[in-house]
Image (cartoon, rainbow, N blue to C red):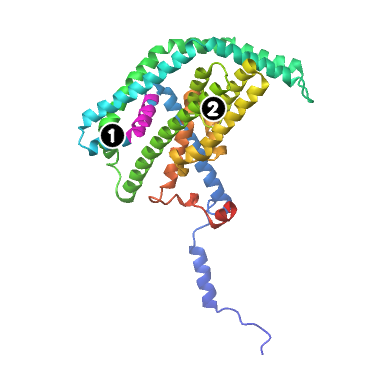
Amino acid sequence: MSLFRRGPAPETVARAIDAASDRPPQSLWSDGFGRLSMRALQVIILVIVAIGVVYVLRVVSVVAIPLILALIFASAFAPAMNWMRRHGVPSLLATIITLLTIVALLTGLTWLIVWAVRDQWDDLYSQAQEGFQQLLAWAQTLPFSIDQSQIDEWLGALGDFVTSAQFGSGAIAGVSAVASFLTGAVLLVVILFFFLKDGPRLWAFLLRPFRGSDEDRARRIGDKTVVVLGSYIRGTAAVAAVDAIGIYIALLILQVPLAIPLAVLVFLLAFIPIVGATLAGILAALVALVANGPVNALFVVGAVILVNQLEGNFLQPVLMGRTMKLHAFVVLIALTAGTAIGGILGTLLAVPITAVVWGIVQVWDGPNLPARWARPKARDAELRS
């Protein structure tokens, strides 16, 4: 046995040296740090694009807001339009019937709000304010009593903001924006008319640049957007109506005053998930605390919790489907971002837009096939069990 291991042949070494010299130099973006940098750069570009889109939408809000609202209403009433078309109703007649129905519903809701709140708003405000003062007095009796000077400082800061020039200028700007509101309302009706009448034709026109699998994906996205928006709005409206009726009956049984204005506020605030129900329950409890005492206020809180539990565990899964159910953490983040970007309107639109985005992810690779990164893994099923 030889004590020396025979090395490679000189020809083999020469070929290896030639191959190494012909190999292109390693790119700085091909290693792990380079790939991480590329992903970070992509995220930064996406954030810049999103900021640009939000900025443009805010600049052209007079057009963007009616367009978004018209899409929501058209999606909500799409089943009615499809039903009338299938039964031979002319498209123009079906559009007029649906449009008049939407205008009548919005007008009736506005009249109900004005009628319920106009005559009793002062009483509702004073009752809530007095209940808040009683709540502060009760807080002083807690073992970890809050410093009265700190409470006065908070209230003073709130009062300074309300009476500040910034708040006042915003109020004046809101009053001067009546013309813009009317313009947006007229534009909303016009856009909604064309969405209802020619929605399928408009969507077919937008699909012309797409071919093959891209066209199939675009069709899935459009269909899913209409389904999610329509189901969300119809389901939320039904849940809000049930909540308002349930709270109204409970307030009548407990003999809490201002039951109608409180029920109307419950209906309106129900369109803001989680936060709206909490605000409505707090307001109703404060009124009951002033009018009927702490025991009655506790019964009101119990009634609100019961109605909310029935809503979350029964009504929403039945009326809206579990596929659109978003995690509470996602809802809170969406509400915060929507409020920061678009104020009250952003608060109302944040959750349905988030539901649409998640719905698009669910059909990205197929009718029932989510995007690859969003597909559940085997460990997810184990964690759920």
Query: Residue 183: image x %, image y %?
Result: 35, 16
87 left or right of 168?
left
Q: Which residue is farthest bottom?
A: 1
Query: Residue 352: image x %, image y %?
Result: 45, 34
Query: Residue 35: image x %, image y %?
Result: 54, 50
205 left or right of 382?
left
Residue on which the image places disc 1: 81
Assign the C terminus to one quadrant of the image. bottom right
The main secondary structure of the magenta stretch is: helix
How far apart in space, not on screen, are marks 2 and 1 (Cα)?
31 Å
- Look at label 2 and name its amino acid: Gly
Identify which residue, 305 or 269, lies in the foreground: 305
Residue 175 seen in the current view: yes
Q: Tell me whether the residue at label 2 lies in contact with that at label 1, contact meaning CB atoms closer than 8 angstroms.
A: no
Q: Is residue 71 magenta?
A: yes
Query: Can you say whether 383 is above or below 301 in the image?
Result: below
Q: Earlier along the polypeptide chain: callout 2 or callout 1?
A: 1
Residue on which the image places disc 2: 276
Q: Is residue 147 magenta?
A: no
